[in-house]
Image (cartoon, coloured by chain):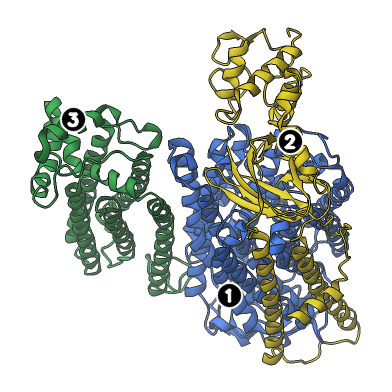
Amino acid sequence: MAVATPALAGTDTTDNQTPKNYLNASRGLLSWFFTLDHKRIGVMYLIAILSSFFLGGVFALLLRTELLTPAQTIMDADTYNKMFTLHGAVMIFLFIIPGIPATLGNFVLPLMLGAKDVALPRLNLASFWLWMIGAVFAVSSIVVGAVDTGWTFYTPYSTTTGTAVISMTLGAFILGFSSIFTGLNFIVTIHKMRPEGMTWFRMPLFLWGIYSTAIIQVLATPVLGITLLLLVAERTLGVGIFDPALGGDPVLYQHFFWFYSHPAVYIMILPAMAIMSELMSVFSGKHIFGYRFIAWSSVAIALLSFLVWGHHMFTSGQAGITNMIFSALTFSVAIPSAVKVFNWVATMYKGSIRLATPMLYALSFLFLFSIGGLTGLFLGALSTDVHLHDTYFVVAHFHYVMFGGTVIAFLGGLHYWWPKMFGRMYSERWGSIAALLVFVGFNLTFFSQFVMGSQGMPRRYFNYVDRFTSYHQISTIGSYVLGLGFFVIAGYLLHSLVRGDRAPANPWGGATLEWETSSPPPPHNFDCEFRAGDPYDLDDLRYDPEIKGHVRRDPESIRLHPKGAQQ
Amino acid sequence: MTGHAHAQDPNVAHHFENADQQYQSAKLGMWVFLATEILFFGGLFCAYAVYRANHPEIFVFGHHFLDKSLGALNTVILICSSFTIAWAVRAAQLKQIRLLKVLLALTLACAAGFLSVKYVEYSHKWKHGLLWASRYSPEAHHGEQRDHAEETGAESAASGETTESSPEAVQEGLERSKIAPAASGPAGLAVADERPGEEIVAEPKNAQVYFSIYFLLTGLHGIHVLGGMGAMAWLLSLARRGAFDTGHFTKVDMVALYWHLVDLIWIYLFLLLYLID
Amino acid sequence: MMDLQIASNLLSALPEGTEPSMWMPPRVSTVAHHVDWLFNFILAVSVFFFLLIVVLMVLFVIRYRRREGHQAEDSPSHNMALELTWSLIPLALVVVIFFFGFKGFLDMTTSPANAYEILVDGQKWNWSFTYPNGYVDSNLHAPVQRPVRLVMTSADVIHSLYVPAFRIKSDLVPGRYSKAWFEATEPGQYELFCAEYCGTSHSDMIAQVIVHPPGEFEKWLEQASNFLETMTPVEAGFKLYQVRGCQQCHSVDGSAKTGPTLLGIFGHTQALADGGSIVADENYIRESILEPAARVVAGYEPVMPTYQGRIKDEEITAIIEYLKSLSGTE
């Protein structure tokens, strides 16, 4: 925000007509650091999380550069090992787990409910500062020697290596509580603060997605917390629960870890699916197809996600019957995901499809997530997983789901709500160019990894055998294209803060409540309360070319007793 | 924050419509938080269960070094404190501020009592080197303990605690006053139904893991007790400043819920660590 | 089920023989077809659904894109029958995939009773394969067309034995034994990777699988096992240096790796990590092999695993002779 606010404040002062909004309501860094306003917390999270993404991205580009040649290129093996650990840990714990809920969720969720804030604003601020403290711990591990365990911290490697495992795991532990607080807050807010008329099945699907995510955050993250605490205890006190020399079981750690970290994968993807449901409906100009199936599939994914962790251990020597059960349960998660994809495609049928930047990302998502999801079938099946486990096939699958899914949807959501957040429109032309660059760069980077993975290239390899060289080189070139795409995005988004056109209240024609307030919203969001209708009934809206935005044909139809004079 | 319909009630935050919505939100939030706490401890219980299933002998050996009567005493203390804080919620609802303060102070005292007993247990183990794995060094007295037990037979060997403390008591008069009262009572009683000498089992391999788990579980629980004490001190100062005069009891209720969970977890710890076999 | 298998074979046009394809490395074990068959089946299913989604998506975008005079038309916002259909068809498909995955997995993990047994030890960062006669090699030699069972454990952290050409992978967990088996169908040389990240030289923890033609494995084993008798001590020491994992960490050209170089150390004074120093004589070499952490050379971490119980006295002697030769003090 150090970058964003002064710029905005600067333009606002020159324009006396700018109404009071959450950005200019009060000034100074302290008014941000101690704010209880969910919108400001969302923006602070956005800056912090995008900084982490930048850091993790730099690590990724360095790793890809190292892999240009089969032997040492720019760094030695230990540096490489530390860097892929950092890339994973930063991207997962700092960026993608909190990513959508803490930034877009924080900003949009109360607005969609027509509420003034989340139910527990102090807890929300605490969550942000816990994130910051956790980030300091995690990143400070770089200073004290970095970690070389991989982001999974498998024992007994993590208990015996001489690197800074403790500061990294304590960081992840604290970040876990940040995540728990966010999830807890959203559960309470959705349960207790829905407006009149918004029954569970009239909630925007974004809220269903965030709610399902919150359930996982609250129920799985504590187990990660205790697991990491045990790992720290194992290192400092020599407890022995994971140490075979003391009668412990190193594979138990894997069970503990994946009991959290598999559901955590759905912490990452469910909010992305939540965004997709909004984008597909609004930009197709159609009611979402199969609302209930999508809503239930989110909850189904959240619950099933707790039952599949064992599929990370098919080759770890666990009993055949255990493998069988986990494999079967794993496939059960495929169904709700497939249902969502079909429903999104069906939403476009007979629509009026607008290829604005957010929709380009939504379509990218459909393409990339389909590949990511379908390649999961190879890994869920026992016999093929034996061959593919711990190879680049897994790396590619994971990135297609997490990057091609979550990050792409995050970008879509960011572009969708950007006008609402900052009151400015960005360049659609540059938006389309960047979306194309990201799409092409991503496929170049990761598709070749599927092929080299099934050809037998193990993951986390510093050196590799010569026959994989060309695949690696394609992948590295792709990563540069991808990096360029993000550079363009950063450029035009920052530019829009200063020079962008003023955004109307409802630039895209969405029927959810966040579009009922000005862009950016005033500090307390709304000057009235709502009787919510169908969030996907777009017929009530019409385009007004004068304000370049959409308006309700009858604005009073969903409003309840507007409150008297507002300042 | 002015200009809102409910601005007249200072206890209701601006973003809530009314006091009931605020209370319901806080309550749901607390229950969800308690669920995360249960899962947090659940992870440790799970580790305990797996290790115990693989190595039951370590637990049978280790638990003899815990003092059941001190554990039982702590259980009683915590159950009393649960009662007093439940009553405190009632007092807050009825605006009986004086009673509320007394009950909060009593609960706080119980918590302090709990930690004092825990301190006695910890310092005892500290002295005997019965610590977590990397600090586990009980050799010094183990030999003595065995010799002594053979000599004195029935009188001292009934429980691990006695065999623990007796040689110390003989050797160091100073220590006697500190440990003997708690230990000798139940030892005397226990002789009747436990065959003497049977307790002198050889130390199994990796016995220290029991103590690691013991310190992890009780330590983590102890931190929760400390947190609860902080919360109760905060409530007391709020009560002194008149925060509950209007019958706004949400905060007391939330701390009480938390405290009941701390109590409940201790009961499980008592069962799992002290009352083995 | 039979129909399904035939159908999928047609669908995937599985090449006969061992030729590598775009997706798969050469296929040289009897269980590999379980993997390749299912892989190709899932690939076909995936390509079908992927094309279905993308083609529909593109068609809709072209047909219904926002333009002058085009408006969204009314259509139902849900259709139970349709939605159930696209829930149940994938469900049926994944049940099939699961079933064949499990069936193949059982065959891949259940070794025949008469299998030839080789013990596998993983340690940072080399493999030791112990044959029934006690001979230890750093590469996996196996007879062709005979089931081989690997009984595996790790000396330090978790490793994973992965032979892409055999489609087998199994973790080596310290403190327990895991098993894998294969029956090679073609003589030749194949890569064996460590697939579970294990530290600095994880990516160098590669061995070769050498599948011998019929009858030649026994000859190789007999000859290799007698190396102490048939070779000079220096040659035998060099062989041990290569096959027992020394060379992963100790160079013989003067460069420092994870451990100090062995070039010219024998008979010379070594500075120790604890501040002292010692002349590297026979006894120090022996101690360093059996108790590596006892006296560590300054500047290096005590990470070397012990060879206590895993190396014979004659072998230590041969290594000492080899080190002498490196220092010119033979």
Q: Amino acid at mark 3?
A: Asp
Name the residue: 50% across, 52% down.
A252
Residue B265, compared with residue C257, is above or below; it is below
The residues bearing labels 2 and 1 have C-alpha atoms spaced at a distance of 60 Å
Crowding at dot 3, Cα within 10 Å, few <14 / some 14-19 / many 20+, comes out as few
Residue C103 or residue A278, whichever sits in front? C103
Q: For mark 2, what is the residue?
A: C222
Q: Which shade of the palette goes to chain A?
A: blue
Q: Are marks 3 and 2 on the same chain?
A: no
Q: Nearer the viewer, mark 3 or mark 1?
A: 3
- For the C terminus of chain A, the quadrant is bottom right
Which percent across, then down, holds residue A367?
80, 69
Measuring from the top left, give residue B56's x and y in whole percent: 34, 50
Given the image, what chain letter belongs to the residue carrying mark 2? C
**Separation of disc 3 and disc 1 at Cα?**
63 Å
**Quadrant position of residue C101:** bottom right
* Residue for badge 3: B147
Question: What residue sits right under mark 1 in the picture?
Answer: A300
10 Å neighbourhood of mark 1: few (<14), some, or many (≥20)? Answer: some
